[in-house]
């Protein structure tokens, strides 16, 4: 369930390449998805992404992904300058395919998770997390 | 589950009060002769369980004037729905006669004239009388405090909430939930909560570090009343660290937490609860949505958005009761619970007309004792209103109190633009009346009230205003924090509340020159109630006091600098 050093480097390279591309952040999200899925179609069932609707603190936003039967789950903060938040790999002996962590969100954006299932199919879940300046409650 | 007949028994305060018209010509005595304490308290005791709800008192121990909003717009599914109906439309909806006591208590319009006739409302000594009378009918009635109790006055600020704790304890509440209380700082909140003789609740108060339910607050409390197992689940204000300074209570995380609420409902049902009550500080639109998401809640006692509704709102099998603010109302809900089911209810929003309801002597003495050390400071007259200026706060975009505060900031802090928070607390001051130091504190008192002076570009200002507008007009209630739009001085703007974030605010104009705000130019901005920790400046109540003292008599003409598109 940890991110390997190799993957961290790949993500860093991906991000570096993406920022150099002329078509900006959205394309880099697409690049990450393509790299992870090989362009496979994404289903919508079988992956639960839990994230707050409004972040209490954008610097540390608790998220959880849960996809029974997954071998790998990638999390993307689609509106961050570096969208790759992490990829969780599950070995054969993993008791459950669930992980929780905290991520930093630069602004209001969609958080996206994509799970690679053991049969080679892919499913996704997306939730918008609002990062607000804050203000005045009644 | 609830029969039509039982619904009809939900009685309006309006029907219990003589609705004779004739405001304007009535002398105060004549108006009050038409009202009696017996009429206000009249209630045919029903079923086997009684709930008493008070909420959002904001430390108003003494009777006050409080004008309800004339502008309270709803968006999305709540457009044109309760509580987003105001003034004459509100009165038509509930069959309230113009000029009647209910008109004055529950809606805007002719406020200054009606206030002369009907007098101040609220006062915790009057609330005590009403609570005691209900307990005389039903000795084991459950009294529930929806929070925003330990905030909002000079004495509350100076005693760090102790004055309100002492007086409320005389009323013997059974449970309470929270919002502004946390702005006392988490150490002080824990200190008070440890000594409370009743349950301090919030199923959505979590430990921020571990994201687990906080051990400092109970999620719920079970009561056995009238042979019925009653569960009361607490729901604190969900947006605490966003709407108020999170650095004051860093150990806690909040949120709505529907799933945990459902778990708590299932847990109390499994433990034998026959009636499930949620004591909520969500705000009414959020409560309506939550009632649709969570199954098994019979009654939501709703606070935060300060709505006073003469009838419950029904969502599926859940009834939602909204009990107003600032001590103006007490809700009584009688329930018939049989075989583990709510079979029917009877409800009354009791308006606390302070000249009609006799103060409870013990509570009155306790209130005076709390005020005594501060009496001279409280009562000092700082200035007056002129004969056309009613000072009030409620409204989505502006209120005359806030216009006055913005003028004080522009003048005293030598700024081009003023910003004032869109809070919903703070009593009103009638035309041609003294303004005391207490009155100024009632609309400004808070633990982060320093008046900053800074520079912001036109672009930053627009971003801030778009952000606040989205907290108010996001079509999804779960993104609404329940305050009103930030008040502005020195600038005007147009707002289309139906647009998404980033597209609502347009035509930002510097009023002094009539020129559009330049996105790249920096302007001098004064404001208060910043959620940032390192804010510097004089306290806002001192700024406002200095301004009013210099003016002598204040005049606040109607504000026409905000143009609204629905």
Image: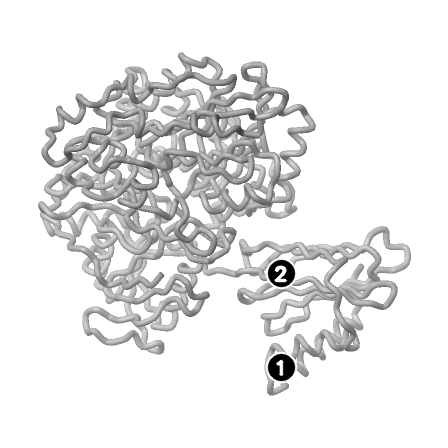
- The quarter of the picture where residue B512 lies is bottom left
Residue at 24% across / 25% down in the picture?
B18
Q: Secondary structure at mark 1?
A: helix
Query: How far apart are the two marked residues, 2 and 1, measured between alpha carbons?
Result: 24 Å
Quarter of the image holding residue A67?
bottom right
- Based on the displayed image, in which of its 4 quarters is residue A86 positioned? bottom right
Q: In the image, what residue occupies the spot 15% across and 31% down?
A: B117
Side (left or right) of B398 relative to B56 = left
Pointer 1 residue: A19
Secondary structure beneath dot 2 equals: strand
Residue assigned mark 2 = A127
Q: Residue furthest right?
A: A92
Along the line of sight, the residue nearer the viewer: B308 or A105: B308
Residue in the picture at 13% in, 45% down: B385
| Mark 2 neighbour class, 10 Å CA radius: few under 14, some 14 to 19, many 20 or more | some
Is A72 situated left or right of B37 in this image? right
In front here: A40 or B39?
A: B39
Q: Chain of mark 1?
A: A
- In percent of width and height, residue B32 lies at 18, 24
Q: Is residue A6 above or below residue B95?
A: below
Q: Residue furthest bottom?
A: A22
Q: Nearer the viewer, residue B509 or B186?
A: B509
Give the farthest residue toward the front: B4
Residue B195 seen from this side: no
Quarter of the picture containing the N terminus of chain A is bottom right
Which percent across, then down, holds residue B348? 38, 27
């Amino acid at each position: 369930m940890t991110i390997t050093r190799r993957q961290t480097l790949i993500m860093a390279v991906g991000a570096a390449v993406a920022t150099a591309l002329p078509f900006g952040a959205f394309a880099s999200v697409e690049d990450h998805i393509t790299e992870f899925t090989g362009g496979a179609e994404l289903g919508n069932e079988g992956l639960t992404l839990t994230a707050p609707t409004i972040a209490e603190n954008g610097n540390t936003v608790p998220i959880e992904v849960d996809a029974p039967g997954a071998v790998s789950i990638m999390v993307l903060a689609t509106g961050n300058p570096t969208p790759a938040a992490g990829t969780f790999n599950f070995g054969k002996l993993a008791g459950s395919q669930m992980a929780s962590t905290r991520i930093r969100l630069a602004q209001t954006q969609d958080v996206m998770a994509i799970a690679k299932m053991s049969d080679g199919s892919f499913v996704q879940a997306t939730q918008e997390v609002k990062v607000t300046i804050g203000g005045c409650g009644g | 589950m609830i029969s039509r007949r039982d619904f009809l028994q939900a009685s309006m305060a309006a029907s219990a009060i003589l609705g004779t018209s004739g405001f304007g010509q009535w002398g105060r005595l004549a108006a009050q002769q038409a009202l009696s304490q017996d009429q206000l308290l009249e209630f045919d005791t029903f079923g086997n369980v009684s709930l008493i709800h008070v909420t959002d008192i904001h430390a108003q121990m003494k009777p006050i004037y409080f004008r309800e909003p004339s502008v309270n717009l709803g968006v999305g599914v709540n457009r044109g729905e309760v509580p987003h109906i105001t003034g004459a439309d509100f009165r038509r909806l509930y069959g309230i006669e113009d000029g009647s006591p209910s008109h004055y208590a529950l809606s805007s319009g002719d406020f200054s004239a009606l206030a002369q006739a009907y007098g101040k409302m609220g006062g915790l000594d009057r609330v005590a009388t009403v609570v005691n009378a209900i307990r005389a009918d039903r000795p084991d009635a459950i009294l529930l405090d929806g929070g925003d109790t330990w905030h909002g006055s000079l004495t509350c600020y100076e005693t760090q909430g102790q004055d309100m704790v002492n007086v409320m304890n005389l009323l013997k509440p059974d449970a309470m939930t929270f919002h502004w209380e946390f702005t006392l700082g988490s150490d002080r909140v824990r200190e008070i909560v440890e000594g409370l003789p009743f349950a301090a609740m919030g199923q959505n108060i979590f430990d921020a570090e571990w994201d687990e339910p906080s051990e400092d607050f109970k999620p719920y409390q079970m009561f056995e009343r009238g042979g019925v197992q009653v569960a009361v689940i607490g729901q604190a204000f969900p947006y605490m660290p966003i709407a108020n300074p999170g650095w004051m209570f860093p150990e806690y995380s909040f949120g709505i937490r529907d799933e945990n609420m459902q778990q708590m409902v299932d847990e109390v049902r499994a433990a034998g609860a026959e009636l499930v009550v949620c004591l909520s500080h969500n705000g009414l639109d959020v409560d309506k949505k939550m009632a649709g998401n969570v199954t098994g809640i019979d009654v939501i006692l709703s606070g935060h958005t300060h709505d006073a509704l003469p009838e419950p709102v029904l969502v599926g099998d859940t009834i939602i009761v909204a009990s107003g603010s600032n001590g103006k109302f007490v809700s009584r809900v009688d329930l018939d619970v049989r075989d583990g089911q709510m079979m029917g209810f009877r409800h009354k929003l009791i308006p606390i007309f302070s000249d009609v309801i006799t103060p409870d002597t013990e509570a009155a003495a306790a209130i005076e004792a709390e005020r005594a050390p501060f009496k001279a400071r409280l009562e000092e007259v700082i200035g007056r209103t002129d004969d056309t200026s009613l000072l009030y706060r409620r409204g989505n975009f502006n209120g005359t109190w806030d216009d006055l505060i913005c003028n004080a900031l522009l003048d005293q802090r030598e700024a081009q633009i003023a910003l004032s928070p869109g809070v919903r607390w703070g009593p009103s001051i009638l035309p041609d009346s003294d303004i005391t130091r207490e009155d100024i504190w009632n609309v400004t008192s808070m633990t982060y009230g320093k008046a900053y002076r800074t520079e912001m570009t036109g672009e930053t200002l627009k971003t801030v205003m778009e952000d606040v507008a989205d907290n108010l007009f996001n079509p999804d209630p779960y993104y609404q924090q329940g305050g009103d739009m930030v008040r502005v001085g020195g600038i005007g703007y147009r707002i289309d509340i139906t647009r998404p974030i980033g597209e609502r605010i347009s035509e930002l104009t510097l009023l002094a020159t009539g020129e559009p705000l330049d996105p790249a130019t920096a302007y001098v901005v004064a404001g208060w109630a910043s959620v940032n920790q390192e804010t510097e400046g004089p306290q806002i109540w001192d700024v406002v006091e200095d301004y009013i003292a210099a003016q002598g008599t204040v005049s606040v003409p109607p504000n026409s600098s905000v143009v609204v598109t629905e």
